[in-house]
Amino acid sequence: MKAALRRAAGARPASRPTAAESPNLGTCLRKLRFQRRLSIADVSVATGIAKSTLSRVENDQLSLTYAKLLQLCRGLQIDLAELFSHDSAQARTPPMARRTFTAPGGGRTMAVDLQGYNYLCTELAGKKMTPMTGVIRSRTLAETNGLLKHEGEEFTYVLEGRLELHTEFYEPLVLDTGGSVYFDSTMGHAYVSVGSAPLKILCVCSTPEPVLAQSVKRAREAPPTAVRKGPRPT
């Protein structure tokens, strides 16, 4: 018994995390921005939080309330745990049991001039892919928003109609119903419908939804980009 007491008296108490070991919001936000190639202005537009506030957070001059943290995470399509995981030296194992679904008629719609998109499975934050369906009514390249560029890669499948894909470095590609294309979406690209019926597509991008929204905004403001032109299909 006495030996046991002596061992207990000499035992060290359980270590507690120090302030230096605690996740730092500014560091986490900065690393997340760099990982997604976002500017502070991009994050501000996506989240509705002022650029000056975000800058002060990154420089450890300001903290955020819980409500503001949730606003930040909603805008960046992540959860709190994922946000603070960016302060860890080692990448955490991603969750393996996540699941969500979109019922017929569900999703988040976005209209861009003559093109309408419906984002699918939007309830799941931090997705590695952004799936959507689209209805393209643009009949010429001039009727689109111009060539769109964003990080990642893109897969598009023609559900109905006929697709004419304009890209920055290739002749226009025409695909009929059932055709598909996979390309680097950092290359300027635009969708045009060929024929009388609207074009319906399924599109999957390896790009976060807020980044896609920012690329659309930039495409609207940027001057037209020259593209390679081939013969118009009949």
Image (tube, helix red, strand yellow):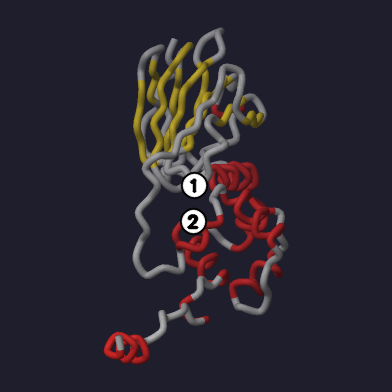
| Kind of residue sitting beneath label 1 | Gly
Task: Mark 2 and mark 1 in contact? Answer it, CB < 8 Å.
Answer: yes
Q: Residue at x 66, y 79 (%)?
A: 61
Closer to the observer: label 2 or label 1? 2
Choose the circle earlier in sequence order: 2 or 1.
2
| Figure check: 218 above or below 138 | below
- Give the side of residue 1 with respect to residue 153, left or right: left
Q: Residue at x 36, y 22 (%)?
A: 180
Secondary structure of the residue carrying numbered label 2:
helix
Residue 70, image x, y percentages: 65, 54
- Report the Cα–Cα distance between label 2 and label 1: 8 Å
Secondary structure of the residue carrying numbered label 1:
loop
Q: How many marks?
A: 2
Q: Residue at x 35, y 54 (%)?
A: 93
Q: Which residue is mark 2?
A: 82
Residue 111, image x, y percentages: 66, 29
Residue 129, image x, y percentages: 44, 39
Q: Residue at x 57, y 46 (%)?
A: 210
Q: Residues within 10 Å of mark 2 (few under 14, many from 20)?
A: some
In which quadrant of the rendered view does residue 227 lie? top left
| Figure check: 144 above or below 7 | above
Res. 126 mark: 1
Residue 98, image x, y percentages: 44, 39
- Give the side of residue 68 with respect to residue 20, left or right: right
Q: Residues within 10 Å of mark 1 (few under 14, many from 20)?
A: some
Q: In the image shown, does 87 or 108 lie closer to the viewer?
A: 87
| Figure check: 49 above or below 116 | below
| Kind of residue sitting beneath label 2 | Glu
- Quadrant including the C terminus: top left
